[in-house]
Amino acid sequence: MILKALFLAGGMGTRLRPLTNHVPKPMVPIMGIPLLERSIGELKQCGVDEIVLSTCYQAHVIEQHFGPDSRNGIKIHCVCEEKPLGTGGAIKNCEKYFDDTFLVFNSDILCNFDLKALVAFHKRKKADVTIASIEIQDPQNYGVIEFDPEDTILSFTEKPKPGEEKSHNINAGIYVFEPRVLDAIPAGKKVSIERDIFPMLLKEGYRMAVYRGNSYWIDIGTPKKYMQAHTDIFEGSCHVPENDFKSAQIYGRENVDLDPTAKITGPVWFGKNVHIGANAVIGPNVVIGDGFEAGRGLEVRNSVIWKNVTAGSGVSFDHSVVTSGCKLDSGVQCQNMIYSPECKLPFT
Ligand code: GDD
Ligand code: MG
């Protein structure tokens, strides 16, 4: 079956700052590859041949990276909002692209969901909307879904207060829509799909089903979860197609110039064109991005370093994220920090 998909990629990424100072949240790199690129790559498995990227905040970064173009045979359209329309308004704004069953994704999700099974479930249920869901311990920062034994949705509670959650099943930010649902969304207005439209659809009697996923799922909406995603990939609980990260190893790309005195404890992932001086101690759980240059005595553990970072001699990183273009003077010790070229913040 041929399908189209929509990515909601226009959010401000506020909770992920300063990682989102120069890139929108969907473009944050996960093991060196922008999250959105990874998500688009996953779509081949379920026959998607055309996607729409709904952008707003730092839209140019997404547009420059993707389109208008096609990738792996998938045609890409970018639709930029002048002002944020909210998640519901953004979907309505892309209405003209969809005339058959389509997928909708939040763009901050890294998961191993079986999308083919999700779409098949939606068809079997003859639903107007199917919402993928996962079960989590603490659902307060998510949309909680209450449903019956037939997986028919009964209620939504977005970001419930402690004690108010009716289940531990949350909206996983992945939906299957029938295009007729778009008629129910007001045009040109800021509306939230989760707070305004889903509850309204329920009231109006649309068929809404929940698909309970049981594979890996994380949203990378905060720095802590951004780091967690990398740990999960290294541990093998999150599968990424380019590597089997189950064993503690060293994953190198092209042109990694490492002094022979370096002590490396896997897992460590290297980008390309990396130069590291003598007596480095690297790993475990380290991601070193393209163009990294470090002097003598580098120490780096449990950290993610983006592209084109330079470090003088004796620099150490522990449990830190360093964004693209940072320049660290000799002797700088980064512990539990997020570094960006304009600021450094403690990791919370
Ligand atoms: N185009 C556009 N315009 N996109 C938007 C806008 C907008 O005005 N506002 C948000 N988005 C995009 C974001 O970029 C993100 O990919 C997605 O919509 C969801 O926004 P978030 O800001 O990440 O929402 P959330 O994490 O608080 O909650 C959502 O995701 C949870 C799962 O991670 C909700 O869907 C919850 O119900 C859900 O549980
Ligand atoms: Mg989110």
Image (cartoon, rainbow, N blue to C red):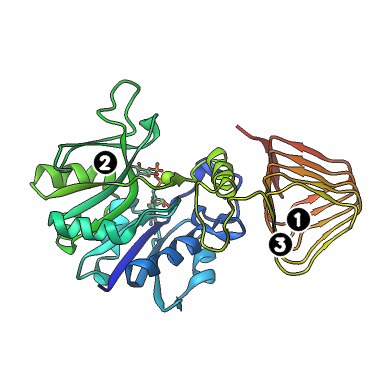
Q: Can you tell which mark lies on residue 195?
A: 2
Q: Is residue 93 above or below residue 175?
A: below
56 relative position to 97: left or right: right
Residue 59 shows up from this direction: no
**Quarter of the rendering containing residue 85:** bottom left
- Viewer-nearest of discs 3 and 2: 3
Residue 339's spot in the image, x, y percent? 70, 44
Image coords of residue 330 (percent x, y): 89, 45
Classed neighbour count for the residue bearing mark 2: other residues with Cα under 10 Å, few (<14), some (14–19), many (≥20): some
Q: Could you say which is closer to the camera, residue 259 or residue 206?
A: 259
Q: Residue at x 56, y 55 (%)?
A: 28
Q: Is residue 41 above or below residue 149?
A: below
Q: What secondary structure is found at the residue carrying circle 1? A: loop
Instruction: Point out which mark residue 309 bears.
Output: 1
Percent x, y of residue 194: 28, 44
The picture places residue 206, in percent across and down from the top left corner, at 11, 50
Q: Are marks 1 and 3 in contact (CB under 8 Å)?
A: no
Whole-angstrom CA distance, mark 2 to mark 1, is 41 Å
Given the image, on which type of amino acid does mark 3 rest?
A: Gly
- Dot 1: few (<14), some (14–19), or many (≥20) neighbours within 10 Å? many
Mark found first going from the N terminus, 2 or 1: 2
Name the outermost residue toward the left.
205
Does the beta carbon of the residue at mark 2 sit less than 8 Å from ligand 1? no
Q: Pick the quarter of the image with the C terminus.
A: top right
Which quarter is ligand 2 in? top left
* Residue at numbered disc 3: 252
Callout 2 amino acid: Arg
- At 49% across and 71% down in the image, what residue appears? 66
Q: Looking at mark 1, is its residue's CB closer than 8 Å to ligand 1?
A: no
Q: Is residue 280 left or right of residue 46?
A: right
**Tag 2 or tag 3, which sits nearer the N-term?**
2
**Would you identify the image quadrant in which residue 259 lies?**
bottom right
